[in-house]
Amino acid sequence: MRARLLLLALSAAAAACGESPLSPIESIRLAEAEARWAARSFPDYSFEMRKACFCAPEATQWARVDVVGGQVVRVVMLETGAELPPLQRSYFPTVEGVFVSIHSAHDDDYLQDIRIEYDQQLGYPTQVDFVSKPNIADGGATYYLRNAVPVPSP
């Protein structure tokens, strides 16, 4: 496991060279956080999420996201208790999807920076700031995640 983490960290650091919005140190922290998340003791989980962005209003409100088998199976708005229909569930990625968004941003030339905070125990991002360059309007976004827990077995 330790060798795998080191290889992942070195790969991330190498990928971060150049014009990446993540520094080599930030890439190593990302790799370490992903390894902690991958090592969690439960495959299916629930977490709460909202975004600050120029996006659908539902995405900007706190929602509980249930992930089973790697897929978002249910999204419930915390304020109202309303469950979102399947098409609107796509506003909320899995935790793995958030990690993919971070990695994908490596190639986005409109981004100036990505700032990430992680849950110390489980490694999932608790805040991700995609900071656009000053001349880009409505290009940035912030993801907030909290309260990741196992989904109870039926």
Image (spheres, rainbow, N blue to C red):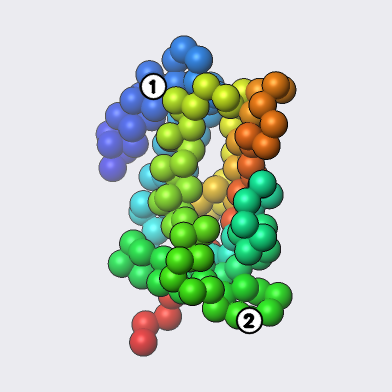
Q: Residue furthest top?
A: 18
Q: Count the labels in the image.
A: 2
What is the quadrant of residue 13 in the picture?
A: top left
Q: Is residue 124 left or right of residue 54?
A: left
The answer to whether residue 130 is above or below residue 64 is above
Q: Residue furthest bottom?
A: 154
Residue 39 at what x, y percent from top left? Answer: 36, 54
The answer to whether residue 116 is above or below residue 46 is above
Residue at figure coordinates x 62%, y 73% from the top left: 77
Q: Nearer the viewer, residue 51 or 125?
A: 51
Q: State the CA–CA distance, disc 2 to disc 1.
A: 42 Å
Secondary element under disc 1, as helix, strand or loop, is helix
The answer to whether residue 19 is above or below residue 141 is above
Residue at figure coordinates x 39%, y 21% from the top left: 15
Residue 9 at what x, y percent from top left? Answer: 38, 29
> Type of residue at label 1?
Ala
Residue 80 at what x, y percent from top left? Answer: 68, 79
Residue at figure coordinates x 70%, y 21% from the top left: 135
Q: Nearer the viewer, mark 2 or mark 1?
A: 2
Residue that label 2 marks: 81
State which tag comes first along the sequence, 2 or 1: 1
Residue that label 1 marks: 15
The quadrant in which the N terminus is found is top left
> Type of residue at label 2?
Gly
